Amino acid sequence: MQIPEYSSSEDEKSDDSDASEVHSPEEDCSFLEDEELDYESATIEELNEEDFSEDEDVPDFPLPVGSDDIPLEPENLLDALEVYETCRTHYRLLMLSPFCIDDFVRVLRSQEQSRLLAEIHIAFLKFALRDDEDEQMIMASNDLNPSFSLLVALLEPMTYAEVLRQYVESDMYRFPNDVRKILNETNYPFCGAKERLLVLRFLCRRFYESGIFRHAARQESKYKHDDYCRDCSLHKSALPGMVYKCSFCEAIYHTSCLEQMNGCLPQNLDTWECLICELHKKTPGVSITDLPPENSNLRLEHLGEDRSNRVYWFVGRRLLVVDPTKKNVVYYSTIPQLYPLLHSIGDGRYEKRLHRRLNAEFQRIEGEMRVTLELTLKRYDQLAKHKTDLIRDVYFVLDNVIRMAQIYHKYNEEDVREKECDLVSSIRNACGIDQNGQLIDNFWVTEYTEAEIAEIGEDLTQVPRSERVENLIRRRANGFRLGLIENDFRSYENQYACNDYARSPQVRAKERDRKKYMNVKFALDVNFAWTCPKGRDLFGPAFQTCKSLQWTLDEFRKKIPKPLFHRLWADYQETFKNNLDSADTVWKLKMVLNVRSGNPCSQVSGGTLSATRRCIDTASTRKSSRGRKILLNLAA
């Protein structure tokens, strides 16, 4: 698993002439292999400090039992976190509104098509096409290039899989075969989480290889505010008065425009946020306040390493411990789960750097872990109002009860109070246990009392376990988890796609010009709508998508004037209708459409818009081709 993040210092060392080179993310950045300390931000004391002597007998450090709340296979967990962190960290470059990690896991597990999954693919695909355009790459020859432009203009949730397939097939050498195989042989995106993650990881690598990202890395993520107002699209000096600049993005607004929008003007100019940034910060379970727009480090830094060379990360509101040799991961989602781990690290005798980083980041870790439990309980309560058959137990609550009982019993029975370091004392207080061993905060155990926690702690020490403890463990295994059955991901909206204020006036003007050109060339200004079942939309299982395609093709057939059909169409019309109604896969629908359009259409169609495969053509290839033609002409 790797979360490829570029370091701006590395890019500055490279020459500008290397900007067009394709860098491998495995070489530039690795989630598992990049285990060195960030020397640029480290102090002299940290660099000279050794965790322990090489001749010292270091005791073994077994990891405590981690969490099991993410309903993903262990081999897919790190890949999912890689894709999520890429989307969360670089959402402004991708023009993709942030979303919750738990919603992303739910989308991966679902066999349905969803708006969130579609918007992620479309954002990455548009970014790749935009980068290819900057690099002067085209997907077809001059006579066939309009057909691909038409395909891109029709990019939407119902068509992105086909656009992505043609894009990947355009370069047999640059793009991986396993991704091409998935897009060609499976009914993508109606497939499993493993196949989806493989495609999304490819899109992430394509993102990090782009010239746009390398330019952002060289700028150290320092952004420049727009020169044009997001509301009126006029220059900032076109209207009198102050210009309000957003603290989290490039947006600016004239005083009169902002007052007309909000009805009043903000008081604090230094911390003012635009409407889009306010909407993004309201996304539940997403932390974007820790990503300052200026001087933000584009490389995701790990917290440190322990004596067994395991790497510690804080990703997706969870503390991950990754073993590079065994390629496995253990994660901790709540403070009671994290307590045994930090207690084992203790005063950092063998993990000084890790201990220092954990101590510095502990307040943020505690805050985000509290958000995890709050979000879980909130969504459980929402589901309980509508589902009468919902399971009665929440995984985190029962898991916290068992772990808090162990912590409570151990702290009150063993002589550990004098041995506590600052880090262990901090996490004990975060658990809600004071220095006298009393439970003063039941946030993690909800309605359970201190007496019940003490009784369960006594039961946990018995051998064999009591029936009460066995019942708690059984109920915990079947408890409610985020990303398992809730459908909050269905309400996701990408503000960059549906809100004009999220895009700069220059971007909007470029989109209008391109749309105007395509409308003139292909008459795309005609209103078109997919035919969906009553009360449904385009998103759902595969059979619903197939049914929408059937009805849309039938409606399209009805709108074609009869003189444009083949003279024998009347004899074949009933057969076509039966074949259309019986088609249960997209491939069969494609064959039905091909049979319908092949006969009545002229031969001109075969030489214009019927290209089946794209072939990428770079600026250097075209230049060398022109050079060869000149040499051949001279030789002739």
Image (cartoon, rainbow, N blue to C red):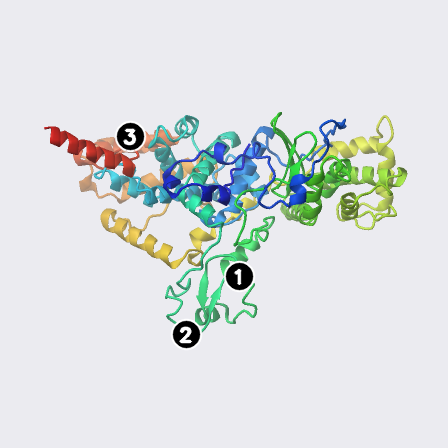
Mark 2 or 1, nearer chain start: 2
At 25% from the left and 42% from the top, the residue drawn is 146
Residue 534 drawn at (x, y percent): 44, 46
Q: Residues within 10 Å of mark 3 (few under 14, many from 20)?
A: few
- C-alpha gap between disc 3 and disc 2: 68 Å
Q: Amino acid at mark 3?
A: Thr
The residue singled out by tag 2 in the image is 240
Image quadrant holding the N terminus, namely top right
When the figure is inspected, residue 603 is found, relative to residue 381, above or below; the finding is above
User: Which circle's residue, 3 or 2, is located before the other in the chain?
Assistant: 2
* Disc 1 packing (10 Å; few <14; some 14–19; many ≥20): many
Towards the viewer: 343 or 552: 343
Question: Quadrant location of residue 105?
Answer: top right
Mark linked to residue 575:
3
Q: In the visual, does 95 lie left or right of 484?
A: left
Query: Alpha carbon of mark 3 to alpha carbon of mark 1: how far?
Result: 60 Å
Placement of 262 over or under 574, stated as above or below:
below
Instruction: Tell me, yes or no, if residue 159 can be seen here.
Output: no
Query: Quadrant location of the C terminus?
Result: top left
Please determine whether, in this image, residue 24 is positioned above or below residue 40.
above
Q: Callout 1: helix, strand or loop? A: loop
Viewer-side residue, 264 vs 493: 264
Residue 621 picture location, percent across and down = 27, 34
Which label lies toward us, 2 or 1? 2
Residue 157: where, in percent of width, then height? 41, 42
Q: Which residue is mark 1?
A: 273
The amino acid type, in three-letter code, at marker 2 is Pro
Q: Mark 2 near mark 1, Cβ–Cβ under 8 Å?
A: no
Indicate the amino acid at tag 1: Glu
Q: State the residue in front, 484 or 183.
A: 183
3 or 1: mark nearer the eye: 1
